[in-house]
Amino acid sequence: MKVAYFSPMPPERSGIADYSALVLPELRQRIGVEVVRRGRKRAPRAADVCLYHVGNNPDAHGWIVEALRRRPGVVVLHDFVLHHLVAGLTIGRRDGHGYLDAMEREGGVVGRLLGHAVLDKRIPPLWENRPEDFHLAGEIFDLASALIVHSRYVRDRARAAGYGKPVFVVPHPAWPAPDVQPERVEGEPLFGAFGNLNATKRVPQLLEAFARVRGSHPRARLLLVGAASPGFDLERRLQRLGLDSSGLIREDYVDEARLWALMTACDVVVSLRAPTMGETSGGVIRALTLGKPLVVSDVGWFRELPDETALKVPPDEGEADTLAAALELLAAREDVRAAMGDAARTLAVREHDVGRSAELYVAALEQAAGGAVVQEEIFVDVARAAAEVGIGPDAPDVTAIAQRLAEVELAE
Amino acid sequence: MRIAVCRPQVPFARGGAEIMTDTLVSELRARGHDADLVSVPFKWYPGARVLTQAFLWRMLDLDEADGQKIDMVVATKFPSYVVRHPEKRVWLVHQFRQAYELDRTDLGQFSESPEDRALRRSVQRLDRLALGEATRLFSTSSNVAERLERSTGLIAEVLPHPPQQLGYRCEGYGDFVLSANRLDRAKRIDLLLEAAALDPALRVVVVSNGPDRARLEEVAHGHGINGRVEFRGRVSGEQLADLYARCLAVYYAPVDEDFGMGPYESFLSEKPVITTTDAGGPLDVVLDRQTGLVVAPDAADIAQAAAWLREHPADAARFGRAGKALAEEVTWDHAIGRLLS
């Protein structure tokens, strides 16, 4: 079987490009793959099935959506909420009507009116303020013959949004642990948080919680790694919270090698997120590989992490308190950190092995490529047998037959 | 308890699974249970027929029979475990192996067409769902359990079953090696024939029938060993027990076998087993130089193993007795106790 593979690829700076670089060699060992050149919107003729990686970044994924429009296929949905992508592909290309149509499709007249308000700059952009309320994935759902997602959370949301075609959950694969020396960073313990600094990463809450932990663990340090998002002023946040920067260690954007070295030095990795767009976190996956205990938000994919590996913090009014308690526990209990680290490493091997992910990809692609024919054949065979003994389309037994077929997923 | 034992039936074929399920029903009855066999014909080709035939099991209503509740179903091999029941125990004999480890081998069934690839995946998905419904999941050997875990992630408890009841006994260690497998390619009886071609002192008796018989007879003829290889066809239980009683050893070397009653029957007759390193299930009990000889799947190695046993009859007897001690631990009391617990 030949697969046409549409994805951003290195050296493009994108998490999905890194992801594809990891998965592709394993995939190629199992199935014929042709990576489609960036910008090309037609699939190679010999392809049995097309695989489209869709994320929220319009620059990285715009051409992929256009190719998907030409030939439907299997979509790897890296984010459930695609508002930012759709805004980029419509408003970003001076197609306000396209944006209004997308908003109306999902939110009805109210959605369209809100869209108008956005276009007229009467309200702040929804993709910044309320993206989770309007996922705008409807067009992708229409075009996707099957979905590959990384979490049950996204699968369930797609189902709740009315997506009725096959959905396959393929865990995000883990990178092999590189042979790096840990960076020398002080801290006993050293907490690390990686990724862009912004409000959705719950940095204010983290700073507040960490300040409390410092009271009982003065040698603890918090390493914040990642570029600050526009409008996010760390110093001002600290001032507003009445916190000083003691115990804080800042690193701006770092390259991959340094990221691993810094993470290796950490005793605990904190990865908070709310609201979630349904994404997985490459940082958390790396932390699992390294066997680091985790503190995460109790949302989306993060909630699916086994409790043995991660302490989960609900993003509610008590968030800072819960977070402080979690950090306190991990600061005080080296044995707990060790046990969670072991569980994390085991999980990375068991669930996130790249070979296993590739196997699941192949299974999904094979079913997507030939599954409709198989289902049709089953349906015809069963319907013919039923008709031969007088069970017609309107007979009550037909419902029972359909139910049984659906139970064992022999028919949608 | 009212128990329905579920078994697919390939018409006109009878092998280990049929013997096991028939015996299970009578052993359940002997222990006071109201047990019966539920059997549905099975054909796995062409195209999606493998799934529509499996689906027949899903349409069965085994909640009750003639107004009386059925307390439990015990499903055995694909696709009988697709049956619905609130108390579904599965004692897995094997999955549909063409969809797994036999895929893309000579014994496979699915081509490289997108439809066939999808069909294979659908069988796997059906397995995951249907086996996942079991309230308890057993397998007849660790080989079957390992395959299941690899393919579906489901964990089965290993529960071997005793072989068919025959008048097992030992009347010495004769000059022939016995093969009592069904004659099909996967049982690799041709390796034994090639071994006989290499060793002029090796005599072979092949019992049973199967689709590979004509080819095997040609192989024997081609090697010019007709005088030393006897094809007896299907024999009675008494005749089989007699052959076990008199043979030197039993050859049992299928490719990646599920379980295989052959070694147990051999052991109860105090005979060592010659098997191969890739035989699968038999390796649970055929332990090299303890209960038999485990060699590479190569005719020369098999010939050498048979010659060694011929030259060391005391060791052959010792291996056979050790095997018997092992086989005697596998009883229906124990198996049924766990199955119903």
Image (cartoon, rainbow, N blue to C red):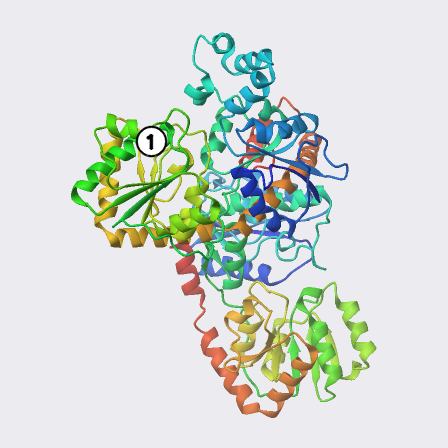
- Residue A23 location, x and y as percent? 57, 46
Q: What residue type is labelled 1?
A: Arg
| Whether residue B298 is situated above or below residue A224 in the rendered picture | below
Of residues B155 and A333, the one drawn nearer to the viewer in this rendering: A333
Q: Residues within 10 Å of mark 1 (few under 14, many from 20)?
A: some
Residue appearing at x 38%, y 29% in the figure:
A198
- Residue B241 location, x and y as percent? 59, 76
Of residues A366 and B67, the one drawn nearer to the viewer in this rendering: A366
**Quadrant in which residue B237 is drawn:** bottom right
Residue A391 visible in this rendered orientation of the protein: no
Q: In which quarter of the image is the C terminus of chain A?
A: top right
Chain where mark 1 sits: A
- Residue B275 location, x and y as percent? 60, 75
Outermost left residue: A216
**Quadrant in which residue A164 is drawn:** top right
| Whether residue B276 is situated above or below residue A73 in the rendered picture | below
| Whether residue A59 is situated above or below residue A295 in the rendered picture | above
Please give left or right for residue B268 compared with residue A181 in the image.
Answer: right
Q: Quadrant of the N terminus of chain A?
A: top right
Please give left or right for residue A298 compared with residue A113 in the image.
Answer: left
| Whether residue B337 is situated above or below residue A127 in the rendered picture | below
Label tally:
1
What secondary structure is marked by label 1? loop
Please give left or right for residue A261 compared with residue B96 in the image.
Answer: left
Residue A399 visible in this rendered orientation of the protein: yes
Of residues B11 and A72, the one drawn nearer to the viewer in this rendering: A72
- Residue B95 location, x and y as percent? 58, 53
Residue appearing at x 45%, y 44% in the figure:
B70
- Give the labeled residue for mark 1: A202
